[in-house]
Image: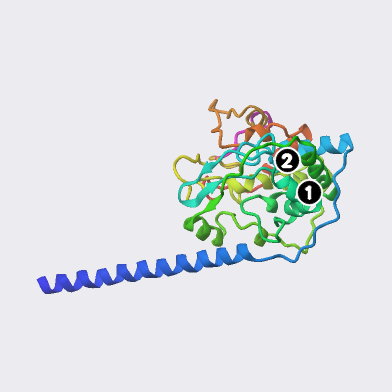
Amino acid sequence: MRTGVKRALKALGGVVAGTVAVGVVYAMVQTSRFDASLEKVYDVPVPDVVASKDPAVIERGKHLATAVTGCTSHACHGTDFGGGAVTPMGPLGTLAAPNLTSASLGAAYSDGEFARAIRHGIKKDGRSVRLMPSQEMGWLPDDDIVALVSYLRSVPPVERENQPMTVKTLGKILDRQDKIVFDVARRIDHTKIETPPAPAATAEYGAFLTRACTGCHGEHLSGGRLPGSPPSIPTPLNLTPDGSGLKDWTFDDFEKLMRTGVRKNGKTLDPFMPIESWRNFDDVEMHAIWAYLRTVPPVLLGSR
């Protein structure tokens, strides 16, 4: 009997050891692929873009930065473009967006290089940006990209050092599994330039605007815990018309949430949600987003 138990335990130990070995090899392969992808130099030319000094163009760029793209949220580049807050993401890594003003990267990048980063997720050196959601905002028309660059060029320089962004092993693996996006440029078809509809309070236009929600709420907008995130990161809510989401909500409920950060049940949203940006959507954009959210299939919370 004792011999049989020993044999069983030995066999079990072998299975566990084999499983661990396979897991280690898998992790090594995925991290290697992630690192190699980040080193890829993309053959995407720098567009011929020149920032405008027209006040109307700059004002449009300000709206895009502070609302549509969320560039000036606390977790991104900050209200002054001097770099946002450092966000520890546990086993995923540490998030920190850089200073884009003329006191930092703004001095190194040309207008065209900024435009390429926005649309294609490609840095000055031709490699992919990390985390910056170009896949969610690259649809912006040429005029809007010029406006965004123009506004960026108009902000005062900010003397603030850039904080390092790190992507740990789990973050790299989840990126390769397409469960979270750190390696941005590989997600973009660089040969295709989308043509969005003109701004209007329609679901068609809202579909483009709502891409900014998918990074946290998932492809299906059903929310659920961000893969690999620590307990300190709140669980994104379900935005679909499911019972676990916005089924019984009205536009007024939704607008109150977006403008004030207060949910229908009276609870306040966690500061992780960049309400300081989303409250700046204009009435057309707000109605367009709501119109689109009412068209998506109802999905249970957590289906992402």
115 relative to 14 in the view: left or right: right
Q: How is the image coloured?
A: rainbow
Residue at image x 58%, y 38%? Answer: 85
Image position of 179 (left or right of 55): left
Residue at the disc numbered 1 = 140
- The residue that disc 2 covers is 68
Q: Which residues are magenta?
A: 245-253
Q: Sequence-wise, which precedes: disc 1 or disc 2?
A: 2
Q: How many marks?
A: 2
Compared with 163, 46 (above or below) is below
What residue is shown at x 80% (from left), y 37% (from top)? 154
Residue in the image at 71% along x and 61% along y: 126
The outermost residue toward the right is 54
What is the three-letter code of the residue carrying label 2? Val
> Secondary structure beneath disc 2?
helix
Q: Is residue 244 left or right of residue 123?
A: left
Task: Tell me if I can see residue 144 in this picture.
Answer: yes
